Each structure stands twice: as structure tokens, then as C-alpha cells.
Image (cartoon, helix red, strand yellow):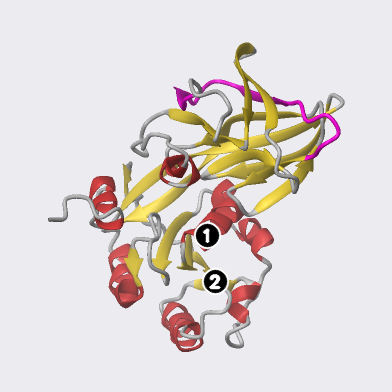
Amino acid sequence: MSQAPQSSDRQKVIAVISKPDRPELCEVLPPLEKWLLERNYSVVMDEESAAYFSATTVIPRGQLAERAPDLALVLGGDGTLLSATRAVAKAGTLILGVNLGTLGFMTELALADLYPALEAIEKQKYLVDSRSMLEGLLIRDGETVVTHPALKEVVVSKGAIARLNHFELFVDAEFVSSYRADALIIATPTGSTAYSLGAGGPILNPDVDAFVLTPVSPHGLTHRPVVVRDTVEIEIHVKTGKEEAYLSFDGQVGTPVRDGDIVRCVKSEHCARLLRFHKTFFEVLATKLKWGER
């Protein structure tokens, strides 16, 4: 976690990233763009945002990092924030998640608090949570065929046929174990409260320098989640025979995996810089998981 940076005289670029099919955004986005333009911000919106009104400047989400936005306003839920993070993290962009859903571990800000939050940002009254990310590579016949970042998790799971997959896990080239399981999850601390948690993995504080390796419904009862330093190189060797497995990043982007493929995961050189105002991580857990209720 870090403090707000010092101000700059350069015109700041703000990217607006929206979740599709949220009718309330038809009323939210036009005045938001007007408010930002009146304060001399350069505003760019993704195509999802432009579907709600005639935005001034529209750029595909995957190209937003090329504009080096200072701030990304993400209007949606955690899924929208995950997509936005993969798009802009490499530009070092600050990310503010505005929650339009219900759960939202990362999108802590309510829509009603948007403008007070923007005013606080102008006064640099915020904190920055730097969240580590994964870089996942799919290696086939010695060549890298897919590379993708992930804020939450990289998962190797079974394909359409409901059979257990066979995986061999290595950490820094050392053999750890052979698994027969529905899936194997490599989760960041941010992802420890997602799929990994549902599969019995531990909750990690976001500032812990670690990853969680969590098997899903393993055939061996002694197979349990393992926590490793985030400086290691993790490899999953896929042994599927004639069947296909599936590799996914944050549950949003994926590709089929074949027998003999290797999935390699390392810590990304980029991080997600999430803005926070009030709630601590444990306060978010207490709210979202209903801890401490009587």
C-alpha cells in the first residue's frame, strides 16, 4: 500500500470502463463525462461505455493502455474490474472500482459515492493498494503459444467430458506432486477470496508476497492447498491423453490445453494499483462474508 502521488501540471487522462447491460449507466455516464471535461481532464471511454451514449472519445478496451491513462473509472462489478486491470495495468494506471452489483470484493465504492470520491482524488486524499498479478504462459512443443496476465487466478481445468485431469506440479523445477483433480488453481492474494476459497484454499492478505496452489476436488484426500513465495516459477505439466483440458485467466479468457502442454506461471512485472478510501481488507471481508454478525 502506498500514499497518493504528487500532482502534475500535465493534463490528466481518465479512462471510463463500463459493464454491459446496466440501464442505469444511460443516466450516469453523460453527466460523468461532462463533469470530467469541465475540469480539463482528457476523457476516453471503452466501447462498452459508448453503447450507452454518444461519448466524445471512444477507444477499444484493449487499446486503452496506449493512452497511458492516469485513472481508470470502472463501473460494474469485480468481473469488469478484472477485465479493466488486464487492459491498463501495464500503463501503471490507478484503478477505481465502482460497484454496480452486490458482492464486489474489489469494487468497494457505491455509485452514490462516485463524485465525492472524484473530489477526494483531486485533493489526493486516497491510498493505493498494489496488488500482485500473475503472468501465465502456455508452452507447447517447446514454444510459447499463449501469454496472458491475471489479477486473480490461472486455472487448468477439465474440458467438456467430466473426467478427472492428470497434472504434475513443479515449483522452481522441483517436483511437488501428481494430481488427479477437476482443476488446479494458481491464485494471487487477490484471487484467494475467489475460486480458490470455494475449493478450500486459505485467505491471504493482499500484501502477502505469495501464491496459493489449490487443487479442486482432488482424487487423493491428502492433497491440500499449498502457499508458496511469489518469486517462484510454477509449472503445471498436463497429462490428459486423448482428452482436452482448459486453461483460463481470471475466468474470462481461455484456451484449450493438450496432452504434454506446460502451463508456466510467474509473478508479473506489472501490478494492479487499486484506489482505496476508507475500508481495510478485513473490514471488506467482514462486510462481504458476514463475519462478526450476531
| Residue 81, horizontal then vertical, whole percent | 50, 59
Instruction: Look at mark 1 in the image and give the residue it sits on.
Output: 79
Residue 202: which disc? none
Q: Which residues are magenta?
A: 224-244
- Check disc 2 and give the amino acid type: Lys
The residue carrying pointer 2 sits among few (fewer than 14), some (14 to 19) or many (20 or more) residues within 10 Å by Cα, namely some
Real-space Cα separation, disc 1 to disc 2, in angstroms: 9 Å
| Residue 92, horizontal then vertical, whole percent | 51, 48
Q: Residue furthest top?
A: 174
- Check disc 1 and give the amino acid type: Gly
The residue carrying pointer 1 sits among few (fewer than 14), some (14 to 19) or many (20 or more) residues within 10 Å by Cα, namely some
Which element is circle 2 on?
loop
| Residue 128, horizontal then vertical, whole percent | 35, 49
Residue under the image location 71 percent in, 38 percent down: 163
Contact flag, marks 1 and 2 (Cβ < 8 Å): yes
Q: Indicate whether residue 228 is drawn in magenta.
A: yes
Question: Would you say 107 lies left or right of 243 here?
Answer: left
Instruction: Look at mark 2 in the image and give the residue it sits on.
Output: 19
Mark 1 or mark 2: name the one nearer the start of the chain: 2
Q: Please, is residue 29 above or below residue 162 in the view?
A: below
**Quadrant of the image occupied by residue 28:** bottom left
